[in-house]
């Protein structure tokens, strides 16, 4: 290589390096985009504008200085800001809104411990496939990693939990980043997304400038370089910040079954004599309205087992909804349709499926679609697509065909037999206090037809799942596959805000109540009256029921018959203590609680319950 060529290469490298440096420092962008130093606007306004354009009605939060501009801007644009007593509750509430409204639920929390407090709730949303946007504050862009208040590596925490994570570095990035995150949350398999907002991207220029101004800058060349760097960083931070930008929703991608796949399933179902549908939460996701899914199921006439958010899909007393003896039905079925249902622990990893059955599996997520298919079961047809839309197309393809009626009738007879036995069990006297099954039966008969049921607990709630009957689609909320305790306060808050006309019931164990009883303060302040039914047996019974006979100790399982009703009173609600002496007037107390709730008070029914062997042998691990 001659000297001229070498010099040219070196010059090219230098020029390229300078261009790259200019790009990284924002110098090229600043040539064409103005920095409006006197503008009073701030980044929180951009966040709020995008949220409003996407139909977001609520932002749940526990306030912090890092995120104040977002909350203030949301309030000004008519988005209701709902502050809770724990950051996890804010995320659970956003999760409930996502499930019930078909939009993205939004929670905003401050940096550091504010965000770490949300980790369990975000993981729960991931496993429940809820579209959720978590907004987090962060230390200023120049101070990250330098020991600023509440500064930690937040991105590393949330990358394993979220479909999309981003850290905004300039004000101009806010709008496109939030739009992308909201689309990602809803596309494919829905789930949580996370955006980190350093504090200097959210406050106005003049306030940020004060913080950037060096106090004791070294003199000489080094001082000049530092001063220039800080000035340039600030200028780049706000360059082009307030230029008009599109805030409308981006397209959402939802996988769909092909016509060929649907036709193959039509042929399989048309030949089946004893088909069964196992419906999971995915069947309630947009774009298909839950009511349309219900009509499709009724047209098919196939007996259905409903799980997760699909509980209530067929109403309270549908002849197609089979609640009991699922294992026996699956052994007898010649075709099983897994519509958004996963072969995890809830289906014994697929072992409950009959290997002679034809199995159709439909799921948006490829991994969930084939979960454990390499070990315990094999799908005849596996479709990566939306379960609700698939059921509509299947119903249209089978128009005029109906499942043989003697099959759902025989399964329903098994329901009647099992539920009659449950009724008899409810009439037994417990050694002390009230029979929990009797209490649950009374509540089921008295709760309003528009009720939404929130499940948060172990043994008492497990019993409730057998007895309480959701009245319609999207009227049951449980944590999902993660089995998280503590969802009750947040789920109920989100549900009541979405459906203010509905009666919202939280079914609590006395253990799970401890996580969110402070949210009675939130219910009072935000005028969201709900009814909490607490099965108080002074014990973590789901664990104790196995731990004692297997390991011979009740260590860490004992609680106390605490006066939770007084706690509710203290937070501005209305509490009732219900024991054996109140059994004869239980209906009257429930009726009074419902009237109090309609009048605007959150109510807690502290029901002292005894032990039964109703769920003996059911596992808790």
Image (spheres, grey):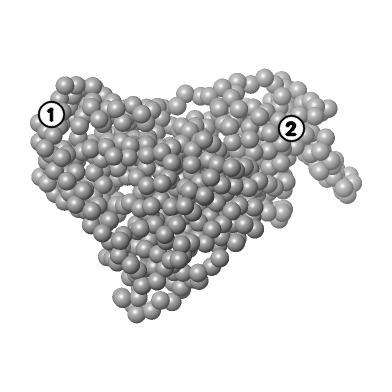
Position of 270 compared to 21: left or right?
left
Answer with mark 2 or mark 1, whichever residue precedes in sequence. Answer: 2
Nearest-to-viewer mark from 2 and 1: 1
How far across and down, in percent of the image, does residue 156 sit? 54, 50
Farthest front residue in view: 584
State the image quarter where residue 472 is shown: top left
Position of 263 compared to 43: left or right?
left
**Residue 124 can be seen, yes or no:** no
Q: 495 or 184, which is in the foreground? A: 495
Could you tell me which residue is drawn at 58 percent across and 32 percent down? Answer: 57
Q: 23 or 448, which is in the foreground? A: 448
Residue on which disc 1 sits:
270
User: CA separation, marks 2 and 1?
Assistant: 61 Å
Could you tell me which residue is drawn at 36 percent across and 63 percent down? Answer: 435
Q: Residues within 10 Å of mark 1 (few under 14, many from 20)?
A: some
**Residue 180 can be seen, yes or no:** yes
State the image quarter where residue 223 is shown: top right
How far across and down, in percent of the image, does residue 554 sit? 40, 76
Could you tell me which residue is drawn at 19 percent across and 43 percent down? Answer: 412
Label 1: element kind? helix
Give the vertical position of 102 relative to 439 (above or below): above
Considering the image in quadrants, where does the C terminus appear? Answer: bottom left
Residue on which disc 2 sits:
42
Q: How many marks?
A: 2
How far across and down, in percent of the image, does residue 198 sit? 68, 42
How far across and down, in percent of the image, does residue 185 sit? 48, 35
Farthest bottom residue in view: 552
Q: 23 or 200, which is in the foreground? A: 200
> Are the residues tagged 2 and 1 within 8 Å (C-beta)?
no
Could you tell me which residue is drawn at 45 percent across and 66 percent down? Answer: 581
Label 2: element kind? loop
Give the vertical position of 366 relative to 327 (above or below): above
């Amino acid at each position: 290589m001659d000297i001229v060529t070498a010099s040219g290469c070196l010059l090219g490298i230098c020029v390229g390096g300078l261009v790259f440096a200019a790009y990284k420092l924002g110098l090229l962008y600043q040539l064409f985009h103005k920095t409006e130093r006197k503008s009073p606007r701030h980044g929180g306004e951009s966040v709020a504008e995008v949220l409003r354009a996407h139909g977001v009605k609520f932002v749940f939060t526990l306030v912090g200085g890092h995120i104040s501009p977002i909350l203030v801007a949301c309030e000004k644009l008519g988005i209701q800001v709902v502050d809770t007593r724990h950051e996890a509750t804010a995320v659970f509430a956003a999760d409930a809104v996502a499930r019930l409204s078909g939009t993205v639920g939004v929670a905003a929390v401050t940096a550091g411990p504010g965000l770490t407090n949300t980790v369990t709730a975000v993981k729960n949303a991931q496993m429940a496939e809820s579209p959720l946007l978590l907004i987090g504050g962060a230390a200023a862009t120049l101070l990250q990693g330098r020991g600023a208040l509440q500064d930690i590596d937040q991105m590393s925490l949330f990358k394993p939990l979220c479909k999309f994570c981003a850290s905004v570095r300039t004000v101009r990035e806010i709008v496109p980043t939030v739009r992308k995150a909201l689309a990602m949350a809803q596309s494919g398999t829905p789930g949580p997304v996370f955006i980190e907002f350093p504090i200097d991207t959210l406050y106005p220029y003049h306030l940020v400038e004060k913080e950037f101004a060096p106090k004791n800058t070294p003199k000489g060349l080094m001082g000049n370089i530092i001063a220039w760097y800080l000035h340039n960083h600030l200028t780049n931070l706000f360059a082009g910040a307030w230029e008009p930008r599109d805030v409308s929703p981006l397209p959402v991608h939802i996988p769909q079954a092909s016509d060929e796949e649907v036709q193959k399933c039509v042929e399989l179902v048309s030949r089946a004599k004893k088909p069964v549908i196992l419906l999971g939460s995915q069947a309630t996701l947009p774009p298909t309205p839950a009511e349309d899914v219900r009509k499709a199921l009724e047209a098919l006439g196939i007996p259905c087992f409903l799980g997760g958010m699909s509980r209530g899909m067929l109403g309270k007393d549908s002849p197609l909804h089979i609640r009991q003896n699922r294992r026996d039905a699956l052994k007898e079925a010649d075709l099983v349709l897994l519509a958004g249902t996963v072969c995890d622990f809830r289906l014994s990893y697929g072992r409950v499926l009959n290997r002679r059955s034809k199995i159709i599996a439909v799921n948006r997520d490829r991994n969930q679609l084939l979960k454990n298919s390499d070990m315990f079961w094999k799908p005849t047809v596996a479709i990566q697509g939306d379960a609700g839309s698939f059921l509509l197309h299947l119903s249209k393809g089978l128009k005029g065909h109906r499942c043989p009626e003697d099959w759902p009738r025989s399964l329903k007879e098994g329901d009647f037999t099992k539920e009659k036995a449950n009724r008899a069990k409810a009439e037994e006297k417990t050694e002390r206090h009230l029979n929990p099954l009797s209490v649950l039966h009374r509540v089921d008969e008295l709760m309003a037809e528009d009720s939404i049921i929130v499940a948060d607990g172990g043994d008492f709630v497990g019993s409730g799942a057998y007895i309480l009957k959701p009245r319609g689609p999207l009227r049951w909320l449980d944590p999902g596959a993660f089995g998280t305790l503590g969802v009750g306060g947040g789920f109920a808050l989100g549900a009541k805000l979405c459906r203010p006309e509905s009666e919202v019931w939280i079914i609590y164990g006395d253990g799970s109540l401890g996580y969110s009883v402070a949210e009675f303060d939130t219910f009072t302040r935000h005028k969201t009256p709900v009814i909490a039914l607490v099965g108080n047996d002074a014990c973590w019974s789901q664990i104790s029921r196995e731990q004692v006979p297997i390991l011979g100790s009740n260590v860490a399982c004992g609680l106390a018959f605490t006066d939770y009703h007084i706690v509710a009173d203290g937070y501005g609600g209305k509490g009732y203590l219900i024991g054996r002496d109140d059994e004869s007037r239980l209906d009257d107390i429930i009726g009074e609680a419902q009237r109090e709730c309609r009048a605007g008070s959150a109510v807690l029914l502290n029901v002292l319950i005894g032990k039964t062997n109703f769920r003996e042998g059911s596992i808790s691990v």
